[in-house]
Amino acid sequence: MARMDFEVVVLAGGASRSLSPLVSQEVPKALLPVANRPVLSYVLELLEAGNLKDLIVVVEGEDAALLVGGWISGAYVDRLHVEVASVPEGVGTAGALRAVASYLTANDVLIISGDLVTDVPPGAVAATHRKHGAAVTALLCPAPVSGPSDSGTSGGKEKAKKPVRCNIVGLDPTRQYLLHMATGAEVDKDIRVQKSILRAVGQMEIRADLMDAHMYAFKRTVLQDILEQKDKFHSIRQDILPYLIRTQMNSEVSDNGLVNSESRSDRLSSQSDLRWLSHHREIAPSSFQETYSSSVKLPPDARKTHKCCAYIANESKYCARLNSIQAFSDINRDVIGEASHLSGYSFSAQNNIIHSSAELGSKTTVGPQCMLAEGSKLGDKCSVKRSVIGRHCRIGSNVKIANSVVMNHVTIEDGCSIQGSVICSNVQLQERVVLKDCQVAAQYVVTTGSEHKSESLARK
Amino acid sequence: MDPRRPPRTVSDPKVRQVGFVTPAAAPSAAPSSPPAGELPISANSLSPVMIPPPRHGPSDGLPSRPSAPVAVPNPTSVLRRDSLQINVGSYHTSEVVVGTPPMTSPSSRVDDAGSELSDETSMSPWYGRTGPAKAASSFPGGSGEMMIIKASSSGGGGSGTTPKSPLTTASVVKTLPGISEKEREALMGMKNDGAGAPKKQKEKTTKAERRALQEAQRAAKAAAKEAAAAGSAVPANTKQGKMVTPLQKKDGPQVAAPSVPSEKKVVDRPIEKDRKKDVPPPRMQFDDMHSVKKAKRRAIVNQLEAKNRVELFRHLPQYVHGTLLPDLESKFFQLDAVHPSVYKVGLHYLSGNISGGNARCIAMLVAFREAIKDYSTPSEKALVRDLTAKISSYVSFLIECRPLSISMGVAIKFLKNRIAKLPHSMSESEAKSSLQSDIDHFINEKIVIADKVIVRHAFTKIRDGDVLLTYGLSSVVEMILVYAHEMGKEFRVVIVDSRPKLEGKILLRRLVSKGLNCTYTHINATSYIMHEVTRVFLGAASVLSNGTVYSRVGTACVAMVANAFRVPVLICCEAYKFHERVQLDSICSNELGDPDVILKFPGQIDLNHLDNWADNENLQLLNLNYDATPSDYVSMIITDYGKLPPTSVPVIVREFSRANLWL
């Protein structure tokens, strides 16, 4: 039996278009380094900490699956039992689930996006799900403030803070139930709220400061039914979840299989009338009577309902998704900064991490919230601030790096200045290159003296 | 009767003594001790009633006493010092032989005995002995009768053919220990006369021969059974034979007598055990730092104790309420030992989604049923033990979520009892299905049907034009009101409610939606509204055996006001929630709720003056969950066994717990 009757599916994605210069054939999204660790490792370690050791990882694309599988088997050989499944590219999250749905047997399924960096315990979501006997429970977290949050010494401060694509979330007054969910793209249009839901609840709280963290707990039968019946559904967030929320008062998913296996309060919910939402909190002391006796003979005309719940993460928890370049640099910054407990490294007294094999030239300063991985060499008079520098990078003299991510095996020659940029592996920056808010794809060579601002540099 | 006697008359001293002494060795101390206590007291004062005692020598006493010692073949042949025992025996046999006297006139004899005892010390031991002997025979009068009943009931199984006589002798056997105890007393006196030897010898033999006797008893029992099987014609013969030959004599009494004590033991032991079990383990006192620390180490849920607690209630657990739930949630996958359904119930308890004695009990039982369904015995373990341990671990988890209610305690006891009583021969799947059906039976019989019966009973107490007051939200009371309404009674309902739970609102909504005429008020207005009320119906978490009603806090207040206004208070409670505990106040045993909720007024920000109170050392909040209503304020308790006064609760407790065991 799966642990607590839950199975875990990690959707690791493939080559994401939104992260275009960063991800490539060699580096699928799941293996993008965050503080020099693949982003997927954050999810896996979160699950491991939560005592979930049997996982299914779904990766888009054969090659990516091989890469991810290879990495996992190397890194978690004795710790986790992971099955990697590959699906063709472009099938979407729903398609990925469809591919593995037939393997699922447990009562509930926990679905986590592989690009999630968080310390919200998955157990909390699962517990909420189980407590309500919900069809689906989504983890909502306070939307992160994007952009360099701290002034520091960087000049990136003036950059306009773009709000991350926010979701419009409708909650009931107790903030336990999802009543509405619209993603950023739809926000410009009108919000359409289901009348029946509104009537049942009486009051709806609409919030725009919450983000769907892509950690869902689904009831397995519900999920399988939907995947089977609605073969047009492409994504969980855009299709399945809104569908479930929309139809929660008039459920079309078959609940029959659940009624038998689920305990009392679920029977209550599945057969009680519209009022359940408004007074769900009082699974009333006397209602046991109706529930117990009527659990045997379900009134045939009772309207079927299912519950869509939300677990709202505490403000103090860190929760971010690596789904854009901006998010990539944000997360890198946060993981060695304010959410440093996630990185798993121990910080030095200067609040930075400098590997013992890293070599620093004279008069080179590495500021707080920096990371310098093994084998990297810095020349003289360099300055590194709030940046992550990968393994075996060779950095010349008089280089300034701030708010940037430098991946492995990067060569930076003298006199370069890098701000707010992401530099992928094996890139060569020749002398006196000035980059600001740029992304440099892997193996790119930036020629001497060139200046770039807000550009994406990749080979054509 | 006859088989009983021969051992006394046997000339072989050892056998005789054993026959006597063993009952003394396993004495039923109760009957013997009262006269012992009486002895010194009465010794000082001459009792007014003096029955001329036959002051003869020991040997003389023998013939004088037994009026018709039919069955004593050779009383005089006994050695002198042994005659002591013989005498006792013969004395008794005489009574027995006479038949009725010991049963019919015990009370008069008690008096006699007391009076005789008074001057006994100064007199010959014989005389003294006779007194206590009588006393002893009469003291256990009640128990003696019990013995007869038991013996007769056992007779059905063991020796169905034995006629009445062994039954009466059984009562004598019962008295014997008393006698022998007395004898010792007497002998102590006798030592002064220089006759200490018998006593010593007797004691020696007690130890030496006990085993032999036991074996003999066993053999005798088997023989008796055989005899019983053989037919009714046989016993007459055997009796005769017993009279004649010493060996058979030895058998004789043991057929009748020892089998009875053993029978008694069988009956008594379990009761004793149960009693021991019933004694609740000392409740954890949460002001005892040591034990709290210990408990914390065991705890699954991280329990942060609240700092500011009301002094009087320090012994009750109180945790920082906000912390429990998230902690438990985040550990969702770590708790291997807890079955998911049990976990879910625990979450519901913790979050308050399930409350109320019945609902919690049912939820727990349903979860246990699920757990049992999924249970499989690990290899090298017995289902009975392992499952019991499992259930215990579930229970301790549930306790961490919220202290057990009494209803749950009863249900757990029931379930464990059922597990323990599973026959070993039963296969695992059978055992599981039988347990599951047991649970269903329990829910059905003790709660669902009980509620229906209560509703019927209570319905008879509702008349047209009544104004019924209820407090809070009781599932039974709701059913009663709805039922009465459906049956066409014309009445009005007053719902009294109290913060912070405001459970009455739920009741109000349901009743109003069903078309009942309701008045809703808060508990502060009780005295005002009580003028118009004709009956008060209240639910209860438990009814304790002194008639105290343990219920939602505020119940006592309502009941008291009702009592002051001479309005009858009817408590509706299923019998399974009755408890043998006695509680005089609501302090020693109670439950503390979340102190925050009494400060919070949802939706009224202007009233939330005391945010962050937990940091303020000068403020202690008390949110009690239960209170105890003294039985004085309760007019009637309506239960599934009928309508009773609060004084009759112990009867139900006794009867029900028995019924529960056999269920």
Image (tube, helix red, strand yellow):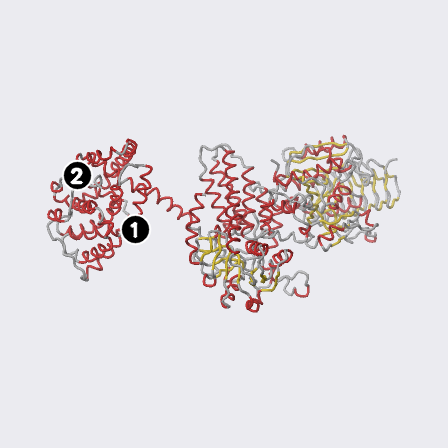
Quadrant for the C terminus of chain B in the image? top left
| Amino acid marked by disc 1 | Gly
Residue at horizontal 45 percent and vertical 32 percent from the top: B425
Residue under mark 2: which chain is it in?
A: B
Q: Position of residue A412 (x, y in %)?
A: 81, 40
* Of labels 1 and 2, the one closer to you: 1
Quadrant for the N terminus of chain B in the image? top left
Q: Position of residue B104 (x, y in %)?
A: 24, 51
Q: Secondary structure at mark 2?
A: loop
Q: Disc 2 designates what residue? A: B10
The residue lying toward the viewer, choosing from A345 and A218, is A218
Residue under mark 1: which chain is it in?
A: B
Q: Is residue B514 left or right of residue B100?
A: right
Residue A426 bears which disc, if any? none
The residue lying toward the viewer, choosing from B131 and B334, is B131
Q: Position of residue A302 (x, y in %)?
A: 67, 45
Residue A398 in sight in this render: no
| Amino acid marked by disc 2 | Val
1 and 2 marks in contact (CB < 8 Å): no
Q: Disc 1 designates what residue? A: B142
Q: Secondary structure at mark 1?
A: helix
The residue lying toward the viewer, choosing from B605 and A17, is B605
